[in-house]
Image (cartoon, rainbow, N blue to C red):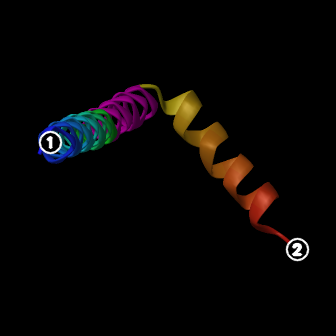
Amino acid sequence: MTDDHEFAARAARIRAAYHRLMAQTNDVAASAHRFSAALERLGQAVQAGTDREIAEHPDLAELNVVLDNYYDKP
């Protein structure tokens, strides 16, 4: 009978450890999701700033067109 209780206690500890592992895994996945969303917003903000800066400076806009034409040619 003692062996049954010890086995049940050990099994419960293993299940509890498994649930803690799954909780940590889900925390990591949620953090990665939040990080990727934040990184996407940062990229959009940087691109918007770059676009605005090019539009405000005609020389940069002209250079951008020249470079686009140069690099788009096969």
Judging depth in this view, the residue of 20 and 7 nearest the camera is 7
Across and down, in percent, residue 57 comes to 46, 25
Q: Which residue is mark 1?
A: 12
Across and down, in percent, residue 35 comes to 30, 33
10 Å crowding of disc 2: few (<14), some (14-19), many (20+): few
Element type at marker 2? loop
- Magenta stretch encompasses residue 71: no
Dividing the picture into quadrants, the one containing residue 60 is: top right
Judging depth in this view, the residue of 65 and 2 nearest the camera is 2
User: What residue is drawn where x is 30% and y is 35%?
Assistant: 28
Residue type indicated by callout 1: Ala
User: What residue is drawn where x is 19% and y is 37%?
Assistant: 6
Task: Give the overall secondary structure of the magenta segment.
Answer: helix
Dividing the picture into quadrants, the one containing residue 8 is: top left
Residue furthest out toward the right:
74
Across and down, in percent, residue 38 comes to 26, 33
Residue type indicated by callout 2: Pro
Q: Which residue is mark 2?
A: 74
**In-image side of 53 versus 34 (left or right):** right
**In-image side of 44 versus 57 (left or right):** left
Element type at marker 1? helix
Disc 1/disc 2 C-alpha distance (Å) = 66 Å
User: What residue is drawn where x is 82% and y is 69%?
Assistant: 73
Which numbered disc flags the more N-terminal residue, 1 or 2? 1
Q: Quadrant of the C terminus?
A: bottom right
Judging depth in this view, the residue of 33 and 46 nearest the camera is 33
Q: Quadrant of the N terminus?
A: top left
User: What residue is drawn where x is 75% and y is 65%?
Assistant: 72
- Tally of numbered discs: 2
- Magenta stretch encompasses residue 43: yes
Q: Which residues are magenta?
A: 38-56
